[in-house]
């Protein structure tokens, strides 16, 4: 033994050793050495089974309601090294794998109720309550409401009958008043007829003057580029001046016959006032008759269910209406005639005004035509501008995509250079052809990125300029649209009410 040279050498390390190699052995899955801890975890690889498929009967209630298989004493959950609360294999004591060492709780949750109790609580919450009381109360209230509304309908029908009778009386009296108004008009002599025509012509003359002034005021709402004193504006100013001259002639003529018609005017005003009151009353009673429970005009008015202080009797109303008609008849018999030739001034003035209105309309039509042509051209330019903006934006998107691709290439080049610069050891870190190629590639990528960034800035500047021009075009189109809306739409609607010479003659 003392002469053995391999006595103090390891046969697995020393190459000169002639000792026989020891055969290596491995345990299979689930096997263990006989000397291992008998209290170790019973878990073995491969012992976990796949989930079992639960089959529920076809007539079983929903899963959130109590099931026939629910336990009444709570869920029975075991505890072990592998279970709902198992933290895994524990080896802090020799008894770590034994059941009952640790409580049935982990750091995440503590079980309070069983699944059966949860489903029983769901059934309790889904069960309706107090249904019979609600049905009885519903039937009782509906019966009382039906009786109340039947009584209200009877009262309302009676009130509607009374209102219909009053409306008939008002309509009859209003008809008599209208007859009196027609009678006093027929009895007026030729002078009164001419005077009425002249006065009506003066009233009608307010309409063309208002139209002309409104057209001038509407044209002041045009935007600044279109605030020009064009032909249409000149003709509108002339129109206002002509209306003023015609009014002066009418007023001078009317002053000569005003005194002769004072009594007739008072009588007519009195009968017309009575007629107006009856019209208002008839309208109010008609409106009251047409109202119902679903009308959107009804409101609460506290304190109205009483007699007003200025209320009169039905007998006084009949007496006043008859006296008003009789007074009108007496004034009609006393009226005097005043003759004069007023039709010439009315007809000639209306013809002059019509001629000037035609000149104004022609100037407006010419202005509208030129504005429409300009607006169409501006819209064409705007369309081209929008297409150009879209093309530039597509170009910018292409540049951005190219820059993203260059960024990837730059990262690749930088990563390669870093690996070669800092990971090659010692003399291997040399400046070979690959290193020069990588350096040249990085420089070229940097120059290309700078160039594309410059192009990107130029494209952005061009897009900004196009967007600015787009805004100018849109503002100009809005200005022209505003002018067209005023000259073509609003002015045409206003000037459509311009009176004709026939309206002046038949006023």
Image: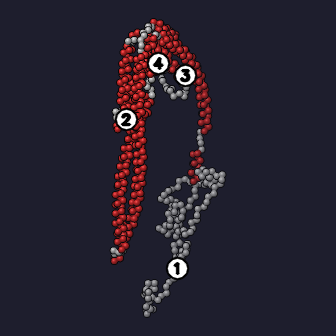
Mark-to-mark CA distance, 1 and 3: 112 Å
* Mark 4 / mark 1, whichever is N-terminal: 1
Q: Tell me, yes or no, whether the two marked residues, 2 and 3, touch with CB atoms within 8 Å.
A: no
Residue toward you, 337 or 329: 337
Residue indicated by mark 4 = 506
Residue indicated by mark 1 = 25
Residue toward you, 109 or 12: 12
Q: Is residue 395 above or below residue 195?
A: below
The answer to whether 131 appears left or right of 265 in the picture is right
Mark-to-mark CA distance, 2 and 3: 49 Å
Using the rendered image of the protein, determine whether residue 429 is visible from the camera's viewpoint: no
Measured from the top left, where is residue 186 in percent x and y?
49, 11
* Mark 1 / mark 3, whichever is N-terminal: 1
Mark-to-mark CA distance, 4 and 2: 38 Å
Question: Where the C terminus falls, by quadrant?
Answer: top left
Crowd around label 2: few <14 · some 14–19 · many ≥20 (10 Å): many
* Mark 2 / mark 1, whichever is N-terminal: 1
Question: Where the N terminus falls, by quadrant?
Answer: bottom left
Measured from the top left, where is residue 265 in percent x and y?
43, 12
**What SS does tag 1 mark?**
loop
Mark-to-mark CA distance, 4 and 1: 130 Å
Mark-to-mark CA distance, 3 and 4: 38 Å
Which image quadrant is residue 216 in?
Answer: top left
**What SS does tag 4 mark?**
loop
Residue indicated by mark 3 = 289
* Mark 3 / mark 4, whichever is N-terminal: 3
Q: Nearer the viewer, mark 4 or mark 2?
A: 4
Measured from the top left, where is residue 52 in percent x and y?
60, 61
């Amino acid at each position: 033994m003392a002469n053995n040279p391999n006595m103090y050498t390891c046969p697995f390390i020393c190459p000169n050793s002639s000792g026989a190699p020891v055969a290596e052995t491995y345990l299979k899955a689930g096997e263990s050495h006989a000397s291992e801890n008998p209290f170790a975890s019973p878990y073995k690889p491969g012992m976990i089974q796949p989930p079992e498929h639960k089959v529920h009967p076809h007539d079983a209630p929903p899963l959130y309601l109590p099931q026939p298989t629910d336990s009444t004493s709570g869920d029975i959950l075991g505890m072990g090294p592998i279970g709902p609360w198992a933290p895994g294999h524990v080896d802090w004591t020799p008894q770590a794998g034994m059941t009952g060492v640790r409580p049935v709780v982990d750091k995440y949750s503590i079980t309070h109720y069983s699944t059966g109790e949860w489903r029983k609580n769901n059934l309790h919450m889904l069960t309706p309550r107090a249904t019979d009381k609600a049905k009885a109360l519903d039937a009782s209230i509906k019966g009382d409401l039906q009786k109340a509304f039947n009584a209200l309908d009877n009262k309302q029908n009676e009130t509607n009958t009374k209102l219909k009778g009053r409306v008939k009386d008002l309509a009859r009296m209003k008809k008599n008043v209208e007859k009196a108004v027609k009678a006093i008009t027929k009895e007026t002599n030729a002078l009164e007829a001419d005077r009425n025509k002249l006065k009506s012509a003066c009233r009608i003359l307010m309409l063309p003057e208002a139209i002309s002034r409104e057209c001038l005021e509407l044209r002041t709402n045009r935007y600044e580029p279109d605030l020009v004193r064009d032909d249409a504006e000149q003709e509108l100013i002339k129109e206002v001046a002509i209306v003023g001259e015609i009014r002066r002639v009418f007023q001078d003529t009317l002053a000569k016959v005003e005194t002769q018609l004072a009594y007739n005017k008072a009588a007519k005003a009195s009968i017309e006032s009575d007629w107006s009151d009856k019209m208002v009353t008839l309208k109010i009673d008609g409106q009251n008759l047409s109202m119902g429970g679903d009308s959107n005009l009804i409101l609460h008015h506290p304190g109205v269910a009483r007699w007003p202080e200025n209320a009169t009797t039905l007998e006084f109303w009949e007496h006043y209406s008859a006296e008003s008609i009789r007074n009108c008849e007496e004034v009609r018999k006393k009226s005097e005639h005043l003759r004069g030739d007023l039709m010439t001034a009315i007809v000639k003035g209306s013809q002059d005004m019509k001629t000037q209105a035609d000149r104004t309309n022609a100037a407006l039509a010419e202005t509208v035509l030129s504005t429409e042509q300009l607006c169409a051209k501006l819209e064409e330019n705007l369309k081209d501008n929008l297409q150009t903006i879209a093309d530039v934006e597509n170009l910018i998107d292409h540049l951005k995509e190219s820059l993203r691709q260059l960024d990837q290439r730059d990262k690749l080049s930088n990563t390669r250079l870093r690996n070669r610069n800092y990971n090659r050891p010692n003399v291997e870190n040399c400046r070979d052809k690959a290193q020069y190629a990588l350096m040249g590639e990085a420089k070229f990528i940097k120059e290309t990125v700078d160039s594309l960034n410059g192009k990107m800035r130029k494209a952005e500047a061009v897009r900004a300029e196009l967007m600015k021009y787009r805004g100018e075009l849109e503002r100009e189109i809005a200005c022209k649209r505003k002018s067209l809306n005023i000259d073509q739409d609003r002015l045409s609607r206003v000037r459509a009410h311009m009176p004709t010479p026939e309206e002046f003659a038949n006023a």
